[in-house]
Image: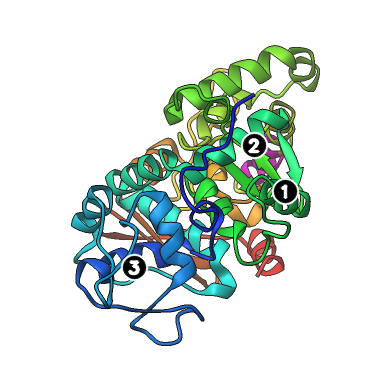
């Protein structure tokens, strides 16, 4: 069994709260020497709270503070690399009451528009002691899911902390979800579920495409009989529609999502008669004499997007590729249309009445 890393004070190993946005904002302020500290939390705009500073030490973003006599905080080489990317950026979202949602927003935005920065942050976090300890915990327990409250108590005991919930571990879980290692509460409320079993087991981190291909191959092989009896003619299309960043949670869940999502896509294609909601082109005729179109998730499933009708649109192959590979900005819904910018060109997603009603149900 692997042993936990204990080469620093316990508070540096599991402390928080430290939302992703706050970590990035603090890197800028420390680099620019624009800070003061307080044990009671932020307090004002120039303050760095001690819990976040402790967590940044063990993530490898800053050096352990020194008093000379005033407190002095400096960035590590890793922190400096991140600062080089964000020095001219506006402040990142940091709302303590919406830390998890903010983290997902920041992750999605970085993946879409600043993938180099996202990969740099991910690499630094995954090589830190807190994330290695999290990996050791799941590896030693040999579990793929755990109730959050049980985890808070169980994990903390390894470092002599009986209750490590509110003030400590949420930040660790958010960092892990930011790196696509686990998800908190999207499969079953109140549970933590592993995405990347290869990281947990200490193997090399797979690329997005390798991860998706291995999960799909395993699921299709195991559930071949189910897939055949369901006669889902759109299964290949559905798999193709997945974002390359999709990382299914567990083998069973992958198949369930495939079956459910393909049916919703088929219903919407029939409703729109396979016409693209962006360019209004009709789908071409396949050799089975049915019209061809594709479905797209506005927020990718692998980035915490939902399987609801409100998150699915019907598009032609050309528009679909643009949505995946071009620079895309999606605007709020107005009436029956949603403005969307693709490579700085203006387009509109048009919703028919019943589909528009589905969006209202989820507002």
Pointers 1 and 2 in contact (C-beta within 8 Å): yes
Pointers 2 and 3 in contact (C-beta within 8 Å): no
Q: Which residue is mark 1?
A: 151
In the depicted view, which residue is nearer to us: 346 or 171?
171
- Residue with the most extreme front position: 69
Badge 2 local density, few (<14 within 10 Å), some, or many (20+)? many
Tell me the CA gap for discs 2 and 3.
29 Å
Is 290 rendered above or below residue 70? Answer: above
Identify which residue is drawn at 66% across, 66% down.
166
Give the x, y percent position of residue 115: 32, 45
Identify which residue is drawn at 49% across, 64% down.
18
Where, by quadrant of the figure, is residue 1 drawn? top right
Of badges 2 and 3, the one in the foreground is: 2
Magenta stretch, residue numbers:
261-270
Element type at mark 3:
helix
Q: Which mark, residue 26?
A: 3
Q: Is residue 28 visible?
A: yes
Identify which residue is drawn at 48% across, 55% down.
12
Element type at mark 2:
helix
Tell me the CA gap for discs 1 and 2.
9 Å
- Residue with the most extreme bottom position: 44
* Main secondary structure along the magenta-highlighted residues: helix
């Amino acid at each position: 069994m692997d042993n936990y890393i204990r080469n620093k004070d316990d508070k540096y190993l599991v402390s928080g709260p430290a939302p992703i946005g706050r970590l990035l904002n603090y890197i800028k302020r420390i680099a620019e020497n624009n800070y003061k500290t307080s044990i009671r939390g932020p307090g004002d705009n120039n303050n760095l709270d001690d819990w976040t500073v402790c967590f940044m030490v063990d993530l490898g973003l800053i050096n352990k503070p020194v008093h000379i006599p005033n407190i002095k905080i400096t960035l590590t080489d890793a922190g400096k690399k991140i600062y080089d990317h964000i020095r001219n950026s506006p402040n990142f979202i940091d709302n303590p009451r919406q830390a998890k949602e903010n983290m997902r927003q920041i992750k999605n935005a970085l993946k879409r528009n600043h993938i180099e920065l996202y990969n740099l942050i991910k690499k630094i976090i995954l090589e830190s002691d807190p994330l290695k300890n999290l990996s050791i915990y799941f590896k030693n327990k040999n579990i793929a899911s755990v109730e959050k409250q049980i985890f808070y108590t169980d994990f903390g005991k390894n470092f002599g902390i009986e209750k490590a919930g509110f003030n400590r571990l949420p930040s660790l879980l958010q960092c892990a979800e930011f790196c696509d290692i686990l998800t908190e509460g999207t499969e079953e409320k109140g549970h933590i579920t592993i995405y990347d079993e290869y990281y947990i087991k200490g193997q090399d981190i797979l690329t997005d495409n390798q991860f998706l291909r291995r999960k799909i191959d395993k699921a299709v092989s195991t559930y071949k009989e189910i897939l055949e009896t369901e006669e889902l003619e759109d299964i290949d299309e559905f798999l193709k529609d997945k974002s390359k960043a999709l990382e299914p949670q567990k083998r069973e869940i992958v198949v369930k999502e495939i079956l459910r999502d393909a049916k919703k896509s088929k219903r919407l294609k029939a409703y729109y008669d396979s016409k693209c909601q962006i360019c209004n082109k009709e789908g071409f005729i396949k050799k089975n004499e049915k019209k061809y179109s594709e479905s797209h998730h506005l927020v990718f499933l692998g980035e915490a997007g939902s399987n609801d009708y409100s998150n699915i649109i019907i598009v032609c192959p050309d528009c679909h590729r643009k949505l995946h590979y071009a620079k895309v900005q999606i605007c709020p819904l107005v009436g029956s249309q949603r403005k969307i910018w693709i490579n700085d060109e203006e387009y509109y997603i048009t919703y028919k009445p019943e589909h528009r009603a589905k969006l209202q149900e989820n507002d």
